[in-house]
Image (tube, rainbow, N blue to C red):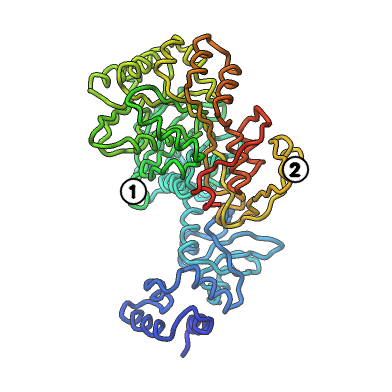
Amino acid sequence: MLSNDDFVISALVEEGRLTSQGVETARRAAVERGTTVCEALVAQGALTTRDVALARAQTYEFPYVDLANYEPNFDNSRLVSRDTADSLLAFPLFVLADVATVAMANPLDLRAVDQLRNLLKTDVEAVLCEPESLRALIDRAYSMIGDNAKAAGTKADDLSLTTGKEPIVAAVNQILAQGIDLGASDIHLGPDEHELHLRYRVDGTLRASQGPGLAAHSGIMQRLKVMANLDLTQTRRPQDGKFRYLHNGRNVDFRLSIIPTICGENAVLRILHSGAAIKGFAELGFPAEAQKQFESIIEHPHGMILVTGPTGSGKTTTLYTALKKLNSPDLNIVTIEDPVEIRMPLVRQVQVNTEIGMTFAGALRSVLRQDPDVVFVGEIRDEETARISVQAALTGHLVLSSLHTNDAAGAIPRLHDLGCPPFAINAALLCVIAQRLVRRVCPDCTCPDQPSAELIARFGVDDPSARFLRGRGCARCSNTGYRGRVGVYELLQITEPLRRVVENKGSIDAIQSQALADGMRLMWHDGVSKALMGLTTLEELSRVVAIQSTERPEDTAPAELRRAA
């Protein structure tokens, strides 16, 4: 007798997706392993689980739902028990007009459909989903306990905080795992009077996600404190900590910040993707000319290189890319960081610890006695660190660091404010890079874009043949139209004319004017070039970068980015 999957396999053979020989091989493997033929075909790599699900949906004439980027209503976990969801491999997605739409791995299981109809007391409309995605959805839904804990008569404060099988621990694990899977940089957990808000910062923007109910807030805060080794009894003052979380076989570091608010403790977790590969300058988005210029500058044996921008603008990534370029057995490279985000071979990396007096300035003094060739200072925050960094650059060391300013020109007056005299800045400073990160247009759903006339005029694009792209939104980009980010840059190199302006303590405008005369391109110039290439949009650029001039930019983006477009 033919099974249901036999019809699916026959359809795939007719379409040319499978060969008869491959199917027979899979049948023998299925018998040996005690699996289905479809499972054997997936194990052999002939099909993916998505291929099988789509083929079943087409053959059985059931709607197919991709759960990978589906945001379910976790309140529906109260409609059926966890045991029922696991045994039937089914989850109610929504109920509308007395009809429950239920995600099922096998909608042909009429007994399961009847059981769900009796439990839900509504008609049931089944939709077909991949079994793995459905299991992950069920795990996530029942881990986000919230009102479920109250419904079961369990107090959130009484839930165990020690084993991964307990609800609070499972909820925290789900929150952390989802943040890693989304590629988020931060996780925000904040209560108000009626709800616990869960948000993820993905590609620089916050995305709301359905999380646990307010009843779980206290337990989650306690669990996070346990993981970060913080004071469990303290709820009225800020606390900071860090911990390591094992996810899919790799360690991911988290930095935890907790502050008290009028509605309870608010937690923000920074995800430190320590295992992330360090890219090249072209992959980061450096324009070709700026890349060539910067690679030449970092070959200097001594001097200071600064990267500026707000928090989350990719400064550390740019500096690590420079370190990767410099890293060799011939050089002694030492870094001072808070925290150490990416481990590098051969590089001696020092962690700042203010609790024991290990500040940037204190660590820098000690590092200079370690015979370094290159010193990376994570951030110049105070006058002492600025002075020691400049002195190090003047005494034969190459110093790389970051600074918080809005643009490249603003770094020089900022050094003045931190007590560095003009002659020292002129002698030490090699260049300043200012940067921002803009979201990339999703490559899977690009379509022509027509920005408003106001935006086109605002950015000074006067070419009538200019063409722009945007993302219409798809499952891969969570319907945002964007996926990933690319940098926009301006590079200010210290030239002789600019040194004269610095010597006279020129203003930011005077410094920028001279830099532009020397050939510097502003960040938004670079951004418009990338928009013209279809890498980003003018709307996204206007969100991130301030416009300071309406000079038409030249298209100098690297060939790698052109190919990516």
Q: CA distance from mark 1 to mark 2?
A: 45 Å
Query: Is residue 500 visible in this depiction of the protein?
Result: yes
**At x 34% / y 14%, what residue is drawn?**
391
Residue 189 is tagged as: none
Q: Amino acid at mark 2?
A: Ser
Please tell me how crowded label 2 is: few (under 14), some (14-19), or many (20+) other residues with Cα within 10 Å.
few
Q: Residue furthest bottom?
A: 1
Left or right of 397: which side holds 133? Answer: right
- Residues at discs 1 and 2 in contact (Cβ within 8 Å): no
Question: Residue 433, position in %: x, y?
Answer: 48, 29
Between 310 and 241, the one lying in front of the other is 310
Please tell me how crowded label 1 is: few (under 14), some (14-19), or many (20+) other residues with Cα within 10 Å.
few
Residue corresponding to mark 1: 250
Question: Residue 370, position in %: x, y?
Answer: 23, 22
Residue corresponding to mark 2: 452
Rendered view: 24 above or below 195: below
**At x 47% / y 46%, what residue is drawn?**
183
Question: Residue 240, position in %: x, y?
Answer: 41, 28
